[in-house]
Image (cartoon, helix red, strand yellow):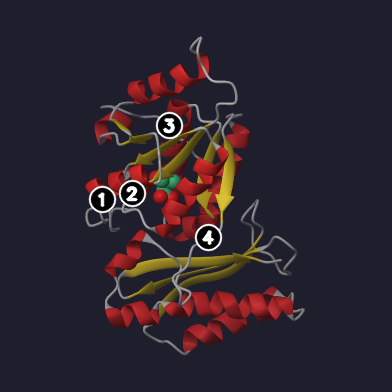
């Protein structure tokens, strides 16, 4: 497995596979964008890429532009050596690990703004977050020229923003969404779970409990957003140490709030457990 540090190296790797006279027939380049601190959720993305693609690149870049000034950029977990070992064990072909200067050259003044969607859900509480995500993912897509990129459903609003971006910019990278990976007790895996104390880890289960309750009400025939949200609020009320940021039912394409749960609607919760912000969701069937 190669470790590439510059956009030029990544582009050369991808183009050699795509355009060289001895380029393999059936080659398909998969990209797994990450911020490192890889866990089983990321591994599931690499495995999905490995199963669908002949060549797999994993990017590891803690993207400063998607963090607000008071957010956890400085303390975000970084475990580069372990991440590379995991990527290698999953048979990735390259890890792309650029510097900040490589992704944002001095004087960089170009950003990708997905209007409308970026102001909903997480974007309402994290101004500029989706602008940072869309900008860095656009840069990665352009550099890697991948056929497919793999993202987790846990960041469902991010997926909606990136789908809109690829459609609007007519980028040719297809987006594949992989299911949320959970611990045995239901907690959705997140690199930020490492911030939780043992007590907070137990409190954090409130998010998945609320999501499960809503899924079960929908399975019983409840469709009214107000009722579903009220049921989730009741679950959170039983754990006052957890501070809800938002509980919403939204259209997964536009991220606009919904009053009724149609199939494919996104039910999403965001909450603080101590100082750690966690999210969870379900796509309602
Ligand atoms: O989901 C993430 O880890 C990040 O938002 C991403 C897509 C790698 C962009 O920095």
Q: What crowding class fits label 3: few (fewer than 14 Cα within 10 Å), some (14-19), or many (20 or more)? A: some
Disc 2 + disc 1, Cβ < 8 Å? yes
Q: Nearer the viewer, residue 188 or 242?
A: 188
Quickly name the residue at label 2.
86
Dot 4: few (<14), some (14–19), or many (≥20) neighbours within 10 Å? many
Secondary element type, mark 4: loop
Q: What element carries label 3?
A: helix
Q: In front here: 114 or 187?
A: 187
Q: Which of marks 3 and 1 is nearer the N terminus?
A: 1
Q: Which of marks 2 and 4 is in front?
A: 2
The answer to whether mark 3 and mark 1 are in CB contact below 8 A is: no
Going by the image, does 262 lie left or right of 241? Answer: right
Do tag 1 and tag 4 residues touch (Cβ < 8 Å)? no
The residue shown at (60%, 66%) is 282
Q: Where is residue 26 in the image (x, y as percent from the top left)?
A: 60, 26
Place residue 111 in its image quadrant: top left
Which quadrant: the N terminus?
top left
Q: Which of marks 2 and 3 is nearer the N terminus?
A: 2
Q: Where is residue 53 in the image (x, y as percent from the top left)?
A: 54, 36
Where does the image place residue 231, in percent across and percent down from the top left?
Answer: 61, 83
Q: Quadrant of the C terminus?
A: bottom right
Helix, strand or loop at disc 2? Answer: helix
Q: Name the residue beneath numbered marker 4.
A: 121
Left or right, 88 with respect to 26, comes to left
User: Which of marks 4 and 2 precedes in the sequence?
Assistant: 2
Q: What is the CA distance from the residue labelled 2 to the residue labelled 4?
A: 32 Å
* Nearest-to-viewer mark from 2 and 3: 2
Q: Examine the rendered structure and indicate whether residue 215 appears above or below residue 46.
A: below
Measured Cα–Cα span from mark 1 to mark 4: 33 Å
Whether pointer 3 and pointer 4 mark residues with C-beta atoms closer than 8 Å, the reply is: no
Gap between marks 3 and 1, in whole Å? 25 Å
């Amino acid at each position: 497995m190669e470790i590439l540090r510059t956009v030029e190296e990544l582009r050369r790797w991808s183009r050699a596979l795509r355009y060289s006279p001895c380029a393999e027939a059936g080659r398909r380049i998969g990209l797994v964008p990450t911020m490192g601190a890889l866990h089983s959720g990321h591994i599931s993305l690499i495995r999905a890429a490995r199963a669908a693609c002949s060549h797999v690149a994993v990017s590891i870049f803690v993207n400063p532009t998607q963090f607000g000034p008071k957010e956890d950029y400085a303390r975000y977990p970084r475990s580069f050596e372990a991440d590379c070992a995991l990527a290698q064990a999953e048979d990735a072909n390259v890890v792309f690990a650029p510097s900040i200067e490589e992704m944002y050259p001095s004087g960089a003044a170009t950003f990708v703004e997905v209007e409308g969607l970026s102001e909903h859900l997480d974007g309402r509480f994290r101004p500029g977050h989706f602008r940072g995500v869309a900008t860095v993912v656009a840069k990665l897509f352009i550099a890697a020229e991948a056929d497919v990129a793999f993202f987790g459903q846990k960041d469902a609003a991010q997926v909606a923003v990136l789908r809109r971006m690829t459609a609007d910019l007519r980028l040719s990278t297809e987006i594949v969404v992989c299911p949320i990976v959970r611990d045995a007790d239901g907690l959705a895996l997140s690199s930020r779970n490492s911030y939780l104390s043992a007590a907070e880890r137990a409190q954090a289960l409130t998010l998945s409990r609320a999501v499960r309750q809503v899924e079960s009400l929908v399975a019983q025939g409840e469709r009214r957003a107000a009722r579903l949200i009220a049921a989730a609020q009741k679950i959170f009320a039983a754990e006052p140490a957890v501070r809800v940021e938002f509980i919403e039912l939204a259209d997964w394409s536009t991220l606009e709030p919904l009053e009724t749960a149609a199939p494919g609607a996104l039910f999403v919760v965001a909450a603080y457990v101590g100082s750690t912000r966690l999210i969870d969701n379900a796509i309602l069937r």
